[in-house]
Image (cartoon, grey):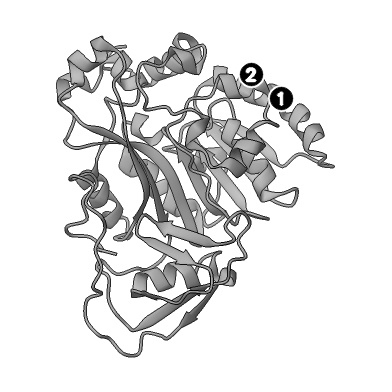
Amino acid sequence: MTEHNPTEAIQSYYGQTLQSSEDLKTSACCTLTAMPKHLQVLLADVHPEVSERFYGCGSPLPPALTGCTVLDLGCGSGRDCYVLSRLVGEQGRVIGVDMTAGQLVVATAHLDWHQQRYGYAQGNVEFRLGHIEDLAALGIADNSIDVVVSNCVINLSADKPKVLAEIFRVLKPGGELYFSDVYADRRIPDALRHDPVLLGECLAGAWYWEDFRRMMQALGCPDMRVVSATPITLDDDEVADKIGMVNFRSVTVRAFKLPLEDRCEDFGQIAVYHGAIPNHIHAFALDDHHLFETGKPLRVCGNTADMLALSRYSPYFTLIGNKTTHFGLFDCSPPNLSGLPSNTVAACC
């Protein structure tokens, strides 16, 4: 890969160099074991070629998607799109975007196969060839998407702020960004940022958490939540020799298009989960430190209350209280993830 054309190098790596997930040199792109059991069941109905040619780093598929329009950025061979097809149902819609034509050839080749297998009268999945930095060029309108997902792709972009800006442009008010990607405990040295293997393995473009946090704040999203975080192993000696001084994690994040505050404020609010989200009968985890057990009241900050009340999750919760009385900062803090990510300035909850 040359420094001047990273896009072509990424397309080559994913379209030609990698022939299956077995060719990967790190654990950044995880196997199906990262998926919950109810999603693993749906994978059995995805065409084998689609699954074999898929490279991801997590399971960025949130619940409560029936009837939603979902946008998958960097959809690759379409595995997540076809799983999403089942999750949104026949009345929902899934749009997959990727810049690698070879990957979309695999994805589109099996559109009819999946429609017939799912028993749909008409397909609910479409794929568009293009760049995630310019969704407008692909005809994706403002405020038209309920949920944006992405699986280990945004790190590959040379213009991450533009990608995030496009995401929040197309999301509906109250819509959700839910994605997995690779994060580093420091900024990647410039000398390594254009290495073809490191870039293709999602390491050279890994986010430094504090830079990601600042990008989100600049876009008016000061409170994003970590859902899960898993250490990444460098399984190839050559890769480890180059970049082994950096600690990497695969992190799943959710964020909402909502006017939230930059700190967790206490208004004396309480949330009660009804237990009605499919496959989440006994509890629903908003993030890595907000587990709502069915029927059990839980004190929440103002931001958490808004995330639940002003999004598609509202039918599944009863919110008690409002914001008429302020009691100061909410007394919560996230678990220590050894500096990655860190919420020292943004919302603590």
Q: Residue at x 57, y 36 (%)?
A: 80
Image-quadrant location for residue 276: bottom right
Q: Is residue 160 visible?
A: yes
Name the residue beneath numbered marker 2: 49
Residue 346 lies, with reference to residue 337, above or below; the image says below
Image-quadrant location for residue 49: top right
The span from disc 1 to disc 2 (Cα, nearest Å) is 9 Å
Towards the viewer: 200 or 164: 200
Tell me residue 90's x, y (percent). Answer: 75, 48
Tell me residue 129's x, y (percent). Answer: 56, 28
Per the image, label 1 sits on a secondary structure element best described as loop
Q: Residue at x 37, y 27 (%)?
A: 28
Towards the viewer: 254 or 316: 316
**Tags 1 and 2 touching, CB below 8 Å:** yes
Per the image, label 2 sits on a secondary structure element best described as helix
The outermost residue toward the bottom is 325
Residue 309 lies, with reference to residue 139, above or below; the image says below
Which quadrant of the figure contains the C terminus? bottom left
Q: Nearer the viewer, mark 1 or mark 2?
A: 2
Tell me residue 19's x, y (percent). Answer: 51, 11
Q: Amino acid at mark 2?
A: Glu
Image-quadrant location for residue 9: top left
- Counting residues from the N terminus, which is met first, the one under dot 1 or under dot 2? 2
Q: Which label is found at residue 110?
A: 1
